[in-house]
Image: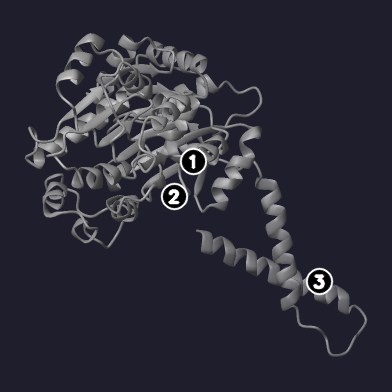
Amino acid sequence: MSNKSFSTLGLNDMMVNVTEQLYFKEPTEIQEKAIPLILQGKCLVGQSQTGSGKTHAFLLPLLNNLEETKNDVQIVITAPTRELAIQLAEEIKTIRKLAGKEDAWKMRLIIGGLDRKRMMEQLKTTTPHIVVGTPGRILDMVEEGVLSIYHARSFVIDEADLMLDLKFIDKIDALLVRSHKDIQILVFSATIPEPLTHFIKKYLERPVMVKIDHHKTPKQLEHRMIEIKEGMDPFKKLIEVVHAIQPYVAIVFTNSKEMTEEVAKLLIKEGKNAVMLHGDLPSRERKRVVKGIHQLQFEYIVATDLASRGIDIKGASHVINFELPKEKEFYIHRVGRTARAGGEGTAISFYYPHDRPLIEKLEKDGIRLLFNDIKNGEFVAAKRFDDRKRRKNKADELDALAWKMVKKPKKIKPGYKKKMIAEKERIKRRLAKQFRNKRG
């Protein structure tokens, strides 16, 4: 955490007071870096994972600079999903209320699923200061001529990598064409894939890059790795894990909607209060599920990466990777959903031979992994996949070190080599014992 306070970042007294009422003790790393730059009107690309405080990193400075006497759209905030747009709108409502600006700061939520005709009538009669919504529906209102974003000063693209995955970048492109050429563009994303880099270069000249270290995971987070060996049934192993833990809320990640359905059915059959969340859920069903998640109705949430993005799942005590993702950043993003706000959490991951390069990358970045199995309903230590290789390497290291410590005879006598080898072995045993004691 930062040593700075919100009052040192350039926010006005009203917004500093809002942060106090929100019980924010001090700014997160991305807030500390991004808020002063956004206040200055800089274009910015912010890369940070879930739970890093990025939403308030752009909401606080943008609302700080809002001119309520102007009758124009000043802030456009785009989100890839309705749920995320609704959450952003709720956050703005909270800040607006705490700032005493409920009537002064006009906001409009523009998403699918709302009465389109009524939305158009409202936009004809009242011009909002702030527009929050999904790119397609905002563009729809602009093309209908009931909404103009030409005078907007700031344009936010939240969860930009998901925008790319869902093919919304063309809609963003069409909106920016209808904006002023000097508009402040703020891009926030968990990852910056190559196609997104092309988009950034097209629209942002010399943007400020604010990247928060994605290799960091919460300090109070335990990482347990369970090997799924040849012939082993991962579904049976999952049931063993489920019986070994008592989660407040557990998020089970899979890599496909088909696997999401299989795992959710398995947990429900096992008598667990589980629900699945994937991109192909009908709109009404997804809305019901998300509402239930926010109300902490489910013990297990089985989800894909795409489906879980933009949904704030509070109180997650466990993350279970039924399948590991291909990229390290996605692992960090997943496990970052637990051990939030200084709390404790556990990440349990099943791994196969093809996951070994990812495991090596995680360890290289300083993440301490515990290799476990489940025996009689409890986690027990298990051998690593590279245990034999590591033992051989360690033995070779000790051998080389022991040889260095062997005293060389001043005079060469018959049998000196044998004596040196015996001394080397004694030293090696002593070093090995010291090494074991140090580990214990």
**Left or right of residue 379: residue 76:** left
Amino acid type, callout 3:
Ile
363 or 144: nearer the viewer: 144
157 or 363: nearer the viewer: 157
Is there a contact, CB below 8 Å, between mark 2 and mark 1? Answer: yes
Q: Which residue is mark 2?
A: 207
Mark 2 surroundings: few (<14), some (14-19) or many (≥20) residues within 10 A? some
Secondary structure at numbered mark 3? helix
Task: Give the quarter of the figure containing the N terminus.
Answer: bottom left
Comparing marks 1 and 3, which lies closer to the viewer? 1
Colouring rule applied to residues:
one colour
Q: Which residue is mark 1?
A: 200
Q: CA distance from mark 2 to mark 3?
A: 63 Å
Secondary structure at numbered mark 2? loop
Amino acid type, callout 2:
Pro
95 to 238, vertically: above or below: below
Which percent across, then down, holds residue 211? 44, 50
**Left or right of residue 182: residue 167:** right
Q: Which residue is mark 3?
A: 421
At x 15%, y 52%, the residue is 16
Residue farthest toward the bottom in the current orientation of the protein: 410
Which percent across, then down, holds residue 267? 40, 16
257 or 402: nearer the viewer: 257
Q: Which of disc 1 and disc 2 is earlier in sequence?
A: 1
Q: Which of disc 3 and disc 2 is earlier in sequence?
A: 2
**Left or right of residue 137: residue 63:** left
